[in-house]
Amino acid sequence: MESVVHLRSAVAVLGRFPALAGVDLDVDPGEILLLRGPNGAGKTTMLRLCAGLTPLSSGEAVVLGVDLARQAHAVRRRVGLLGHATYLYDDLTVTENLDFWARASGATTADGRAALDRLGVAHRLWSLPVHALSAGQRRRVSFAAMVARRPELWLLDEPHAGLDAAGRDIIDGLMREASSVGATVLFASHELDRAGDVATRAVEIVGGTITSPAPPADAPLAAAVTP
């Protein structure tokens, strides 16, 4: 089975700083992989590398069969990255934002509306400009824009941030659903109790390298995500 993410001695330099300093990692189709580690460890850089946004400085990085050293742009339409920024246009309405991102990715208007419903975005909000929404509402809309694209690889940076308990439960359900239909999820989180419930595997990143291997297949995941 070909890995969705294959990294060997992967290095990514930001300025003069090696944010990734030789990462080895393989992620199989359908996995929900938790990236854990302290702030500044390289988790966000790894997600952006896999999205084709942070250049590979040296080593090997193949995502969805695409060699990122040569064709990083080719992977961008096939992945969904949700970071700290919403990537929404504040002056456009909720539905105008969803329509824009749907058209950009080849999805349909119906896909966008269905994603808004799935994220629990109330219909009364759909005609409002994004700047009028709360932080949690904007987060849900941003997640809906990603879900509507039906990416093969989900790359999530602190996906539960800014959401209430109901919203966090929705996100967990979506990650499990994506995995069940063959998509792969990589997500970074400091909320280890919740993350441990949804992840199928966990690795730890410290100083730009992975310091802990995946647990054995028969090991309980809770042990892997205990600080």
Image (tube, rainbow, N blue to C red):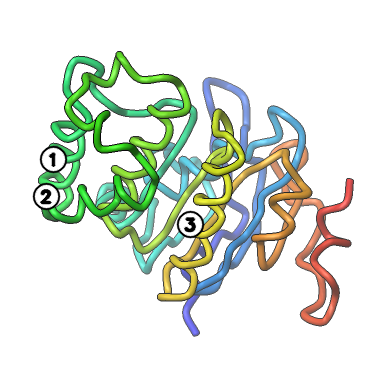
Badge number at residue 66: none
What residue did someone put label 2 on?
Answer: 109
The residue nearer to you, when weighing 20 against 117, is 117
Q: Residue furthest front?
A: 124
Q: CB under 8 Å between callouts 2 and 1? A: yes
Q: CB under 8 Å between callouts 2 and 3? A: no
Type of amino acid at the residue the image marks with label 1: Asp
What residue did someone put label 3 on?
Answer: 61
Q: How much space separates mark 1 and mark 3, taking CA atoms?
A: 32 Å
Tell which tag, 2 or 3, sits nearer the viewer: 2
Q: Residue furthest bottom?
A: 1
Q: Earlier in the sequence, mark 2 or mark 1?
A: 1
Element type at mark 2: helix
Residue occupying image coordinates x 82% and y 82%: 218
Quadrant hosting residue 191:
top right
Type of amino acid at the residue the image marks with label 3: Ala
Q: Position of residue 53 (x, y in %)?
A: 38, 38
What residue did someone put label 1 on?
Answer: 99
Element type at mark 1: helix
Left or right: residue 138 compared with residue 180 = left
Left or right: residue 72 compared with residue 223 = left
Vertical relation: 39 (above or below) 55: above
Quadrant hosting residue 224:
bottom right
Q: How much space separates mark 2 and mark 1, taking CA atoms?
A: 6 Å
Element type at mark 3: strand
Q: Earlier in the sequence, mark 1 or mark 3?
A: 3
